[in-house]
Image (cartoon, rainbow, N blue to C red):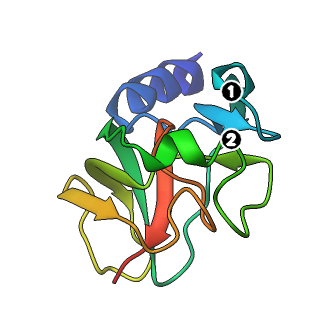
Amino acid sequence: MLTLKVSFAIKGLLPKPIMATMKALVIHEAGGAEVLKLEQVPLPTPQNGQVLIRVKAFGLNRSEMFTPQGHSPNIKFPRILGIEAVGTVEDAPGNEFRKGDVVATAMGGLGRVLDGGYAQYTCVPAT
């Protein structure tokens, strides 16, 4: 009984764990707006030199119209679009940022080569 009470007390003190999945707008093929699908996908895991960002806002621009229509060269499906995002740092294994730092990211293959900001989290190069 004592162990059970202690574990509940400790549980209340621990930070909330990061969920293992997240919601994201994913495209699996070229097409119109109908190809954007809200899906539950694995949460990206940052490596040294990367930063995991909890996305608070992302931009919508003309290029996001072209990619689903198949006009962006070299895109591989499935892909999470979004060439810019702002949010807070969730993790940076290389210690380039601290958890909670407010950051912005744009371009650099985001939404084309790397999964982009149309998600709850995005993982990008730290520099």
Q: Residue at x 32, y 79 (%)?
A: 95
Q: Residue 6 in the image: x percent, y percent? A: 46, 27
What number of labels is visible? 2
Q: Residue at x 21, y 59 (%)?
A: 103
Q: Disc 1 or 2, which lies upstream in sequence?
A: 1
SS for callout 2: loop
Q: Is residue 68 above or below residue 110?
A: above
Instruction: Point out the residue furthest to the left here.
Output: 102
Q: Residue 62's mark?
A: none
41 or 81: nearer the eye?
81
At label 1, the amino acid type is Gly
Crowding at mark 2 (Cα within 10 Å: few <14, some 14-19, many 20+): some
Q: Quadrant of the C terminus?
A: bottom left
> Mark 1–mark 2 contact, CB under 8 Å?
yes
Does residue 62 appear left or right of residue 3 in this picture? left
Q: Residue 69's mark?
A: 2
Q: Residue 28 in the image: x percent, y percent? A: 81, 40
Disc 1 and disc 2: Cα gap in Å?
6 Å
Q: Is residue 4 above or below residue 76?
A: above
At label 2, the amino acid type is Gln
Q: Quadrant of the N terminus?
A: top right
Q: Residue 83 in the image: x percent, y percent? A: 43, 55
Q: Is residue 70 above or below residue 12?
A: below
Does residue 119 appear left or right of residue 69 in this picture? left
Crowding at mark 1 (Cα within 10 Å: few <14, some 14-19, many 20+): few
SS for callout 1: loop
Q: Residue at x 57, y 35 (%)?
A: 19
Q: Residue 84 in the image: x percent, y percent? A: 35, 53
**For residue 62, what is the image quadrant?**
top left
Q: Which residue is mark 1?
A: 32
Q: Residue at x 53, y 39 (%)?
A: 65
